[in-house]
Image (tube, rainbow, N blue to C red):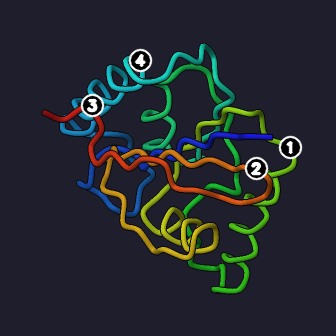
Amino acid sequence: MKKTLIILRHAHRDTSERSLDNGLDEKGIEQVARLKKFFAENYSVKNPQAFSSPKIRCQETIAAIGKFETMDLLDERDLKENEKEFLARVEKFMDWWKTEAADFCVICSHGDWIPTFLYKAIREPLDLKKAGLIEMNLVSDEIFLKNIFQDAGRK
């Protein structure tokens, strides 16, 4: 059995009011255009299973790939959530991916969630820049990092 997980970090967001769930700014919209082109050139999967954090910036980023559903497990850490609760949520997603996700799945999440997931998955706390993409494979219950693209598609 082989599964592929594509992890997207949301593109640059409007930071004029950080307390709001803002969407993307102009830079983010440009990043998403590059991401869409990059994805189309590198992945032939039509209508992949796709999930986004509930935050607007993630939804606007993953929409470039196609249809998606929101998934609370992918949300950034809430101020009311302690470290143990956050880790448990990340681990719950990992279990879901291993047992229930399609063979090719795309997700979009945040700068705190992604390094936590990667550390749990491959014991490496990698930093993914905004609009970056990581490709991982699950083969016989072992997770392998395949590719990392920072600001995918940027020349």
**Residue 145: % across, % down:** 51, 55
Mark 4: few, some, or many residues within 10 Å (few <14, many ≥20)?
some
Residue type at tag 2: Trp
Residue type at tag 1: Glu
Mark 4 or mark 3: name the one nearer the start of the chain: 3
**Residue 48: % across, % down:** 64, 24
Which residue is labeled 3 in the image?
29
Which residue is labeled 2 in the image?
97
- In this picture, residue 113 sits left or right of residue 95: left
Which residue is labeled 4 in the image?
40
Marks 2 & 3, CB-CB < 8 Å contact: no
Mark 2 or mark 3: name the one nearer the start of the chain: 3
Which quadrant would the N terminus be assigned to in this image?
A: top right
Marks 4 & 3, CB-CB < 8 Å contact: no
Tell which of 40 and 31 is nearer to you.
40
Find numbered disc 2 in the image and state the secondary structure of the residue it sits on: helix
Residue type at tag 3: Ile
Rendered residue at 63%/86% (across/down): 83
Mark 1 or mark 3: name the one nearer the start of the chain: 3
Q: Residue 100: which numbered mark, if any?
A: 1
User: How far is the residue under mark 4 from the one under mark 3?
Assistant: 17 Å
User: How far is the residue under mark 1 from the one under mark 4?
Assistant: 25 Å
User: How far is the residue under mark 2 from the one under mark 4?
Assistant: 23 Å
Mark 1 or mark 4: name the one nearer the start of the chain: 4
Rendered residue at 65%/86% (across/down): 82
Where on the picture, by quarter, is residue 64?
A: top left
